Amino acid sequence: MSSPRYWSTATRALAACDPVLGRLIENHRAFELGSRGDAFQTLARAIVGQQISVRAAQSVWARLVAAVEAMTPAQIAGADPMRLREAGLSARKGEYVQDLARRFHDGSIEPAAWVDLPDEAIIGQLVAVRGIGRWTAEMFLIFNLARPDILPLADLGLQRALSLNYNRGRPLSERRVRTITKPWAPWRSVATWYMWRSLEAVPVPQPEHDP
């Protein structure tokens, strides 16, 4: 996966404004941001995976793909809900996935238009979908759309990394967090990625659904 075009500019700016990030950038040269495939399928998989293990989510997804002619908004929107249940989705998750599919199918969500939309406008479209909250939307903007300036404040990993790197493991107030992260703009996604890298030897539970 190639790095986003802004990566070098972002890392130079972050290293210059924050010594903690400067050290992390020096120690972690790899990167993992960039487009990760079809938007509809990425979001549908996020819904399928909520509140279940990774292995279980993979199994349900494989059964779902096998149960429909094609994993497209049109096919999922028009699918018999019982077929989704037989693939392993709960009734509620089936409703969520079909709500997502209908919005893609009718143009309420149009990925081609996102290039001209600000981050909050896209997040607003996504959280209007049943089963998608702000955390899922922010992860999508970071990892699928490679948006450079997303700060997922509800993310447990980011919270843990901030406390370890800036307050010796003690919790930080919201005011202090905002003070620390304000200079990171307009590269807060990149800064967040390096915060996550700082936890590679520290187990941090991640939410299986939106907080």
Image (cartoon, grey):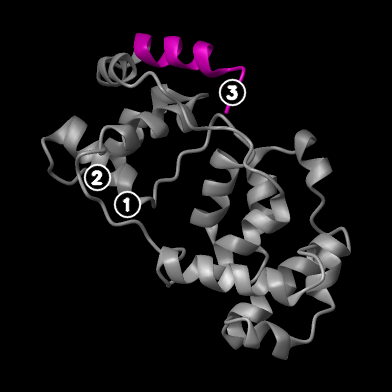
Question: Closer to the N terminus: mark 3 or mark 1?
Answer: 3
Q: Which residue is mark 1?
A: 156
Q: Which residues are magenta?
A: 1-16
Q: Residue furthest bottom?
A: 82
Image location of residue 9, percent across then percent down: 52, 11
Q: Is residue 180 above or below residue 160?
A: above
- The answer to whether one can see residue 39 in this image is yes
Q: Is residue 131 visible?
A: no
Check whether the beta carbons of the residues at disc 2 and disc 1 lie within 8 A of each other.
yes
Between discs 3 and 2, the one toward the N terminus: 3
The kind of residue on which mark 1 rests is: Leu
**In the image, is 28 to the left or to the right of 73?**
left
In the image, residue 186 above or below residue 211: above
The residue type indicated by label 2 comes to Arg
For disc 3, the neighbor class at 10 Å (few under 14, some 14 to 19, many from 20) is few
Residue 13 magenta-highlighted: yes
Q: Residue at x 44, y 45 (%)?
A: 152
Q: Looking at the picture, does residue 192 appear above or below residue 69?
A: above
Q: Residue at x 33, y 42 (%)?
A: 158
Position in image of residue 89 (x %, y %): 59, 81
Tell which tag, 3 or 2, sits nearer the viewer: 3
Judging by the rendered image, the residue that carries numbered circle 2 is 160
Residue 20 is situated, as x and y percent measured from the top left of the image, at 25, 20
Cα distance, mark 2 to mark 1? Answer: 6 Å
The residue pinned by badge 3 equals 2
